[in-house]
Image (cartoon, rainbow, N blue to C red):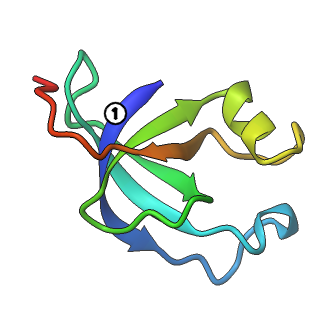
Amino acid sequence: MLTAKLIDNVWATRKAESLNGFKFMLAEVIGGSCEGQRMIVVDNISAGIGDRVIICTGSSARRMLGDDSIPVDAVVVGIIDEDCNFG
């Protein structure tokens, strides 16, 4: 899992049919060796721009969506409420 900050919405008017209905966001990793890396994530918990979040990646992300065949690499699984030092 990674910690990240959501920095923008991502709109895709054309996409694989299995991705219809998902909200996509641009996230920037906070802390660790991947700090600053950006990735597109599925937000299925209604987080918003500026939120610090926990991201699950890989096959665990697909399981969060209930279907291992969905072509998704990263999903928001939690919103961080407490101030922490991630650096």
Q: Position of residue 27 (x, y in %)?
A: 36, 51
At 48% from the left edge and 24% from the top edge, which residue is drawn?
A: 1
Indicate whether 4 appears above or below 57: below
At 55% from the left edge and 32% from the top edge, which residue is drawn?
A: 56
Q: Secondary structure beneath disc 1?
A: strand
Q: Position of residue 66 (x, y in %)?
A: 86, 45
At 31% from the left edge and 68% from the top edge, which residue is drawn?
A: 49
Q: Position of residue 52 (x, y in %)?
A: 29, 48
Quadrant placement of the C terminus: top left
Badge 1 amino acid: Thr
Residue 4 versus residue 82: which sits nearer the camera?
Answer: 82
At 55% from the left edge and 43% from the top edge, which residue is drawn?
A: 77
Position of residue 9 in the picture relative to residue 68 (left or right): left
Q: Position of residue 8 (x, y in %)?
A: 33, 68
Residue 48 versus residue 71: which sits nearer the camera?
Answer: 48
The residue sitting at the bottom extreme is: 13
| Label 1 sits on residue | 3
Residue 77 versus residue 60: which sits nearer the camera?
Answer: 77
Q: Residues within 10 Å of mark 1 (few under 14, many from 20)?
A: many
